Image (cartoon, rainbow, N blue to C red):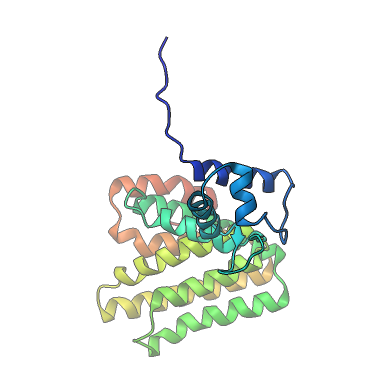
Amino acid sequence: MSFTPVQKVNAYEIIVGQIEQAISDGTYGAGDRLPSERALMTDFGVSRATVREAMRVLQATGVIESRPGDPRGPVITAFSPRVLEKSMAKLAQLDSVSRVELLQFRLLLEGHASLLAATERTDEELAEIARRGEDIADLADQPDVRFGERVNRFHQAIRRASHNQMLEICGNVVGGVMAEMIDRRLTSETDRSSRVRTSARDARALVAAIRDGRAQEAAAISTGNIYRYYADDLSSEETRRLATMMQSYGAQM
């Protein structure tokens, strides 16, 4: 038989794991306090340094909130989407995540967000989407404003109108990364002007589809615009990998 090498586990990691498990099983909830530092040292049978390292990790990941000098134990925090966003942002920025993978994920997010927004949006959310869409058209007279940032805000408004928190969280992460790619894609002032006009036209068409509840058409317009923005720069392999997704949304390539 073959054996699996033993993984070395630090004491603070065991503490982190036990506290996270206690939160998962309901022993501790948002707003509850963990025992004091001294009590944790006694409970776990470890040094002050080990307890502090465990608390540092838990605070960095948003599990607890601790104030220096507070003799009481750290407070368990309510889950915040920002914690997930920060972790995903790090992953998206790694070199191991390719451009085509980011594009595939963005097509998935924006396509479904647009589809849902067409059926779930409120009148107030529609007005915000329309306003953000017109902000893109205004870029023609604002050469110093980042194009990618305006486009991202437009899609953020659509994701909010989808009423799906996971789409919004994931989209905010990918949208931020893609905003930089969008700006790098602009090669000249002429190129910028052309892309502003195309994006403004597509944005108005997308707003109309969402307004009228044409969900499938909204998804096709959204994904089609994203694909065409990068189409000239894609390799044949990247195009192949995106083609199936485009077809599933009924988008033109």
Residue 123 lies, in percent from the top left, at: 72, 77
Give the answer, above or below, for where 233 lies relative to 137: above
Residue 127 lies, in percent from the top left, at: 65, 80
179 or 10: which is nearer to us?
Answer: 10
Residue 14 shown left or right of residue 148 in the figure: right
135 or 246: which is nearer to us?
Answer: 135
Residue 252 shown left or right of residue 20 in the figure: left
**Quadrant position of the C terminus in the picture:** bottom left
Single out the residue that lies furthest toward the left. Answer: 188
Residue 216 lies, in percent from the top left, at: 61, 57
171 or 10: which is nearer to us?
Answer: 10
Residue 189 shown left or right of residue 220 in the figure: left
Q: Image quarter for residue 3?
A: top left
- The number of callouts visible is 0
Give the answer, above or below, for where 162 lies relative to 26: below
Give the residue at x 36% y 68%: 180
Give the answer, above or below, for where 246 lies relative to 31: above
Single out the residue that lies furthest toward the bottom. Answer: 141
Residue 150 lies, in percent from the top left, at: 46, 77
Q: Is residue 218 visible?
A: no
Q: Is residue 125 visible?
A: yes
Give the residue at x 72% y 62%: 31
Give the residue at x 69% y 69%: 121
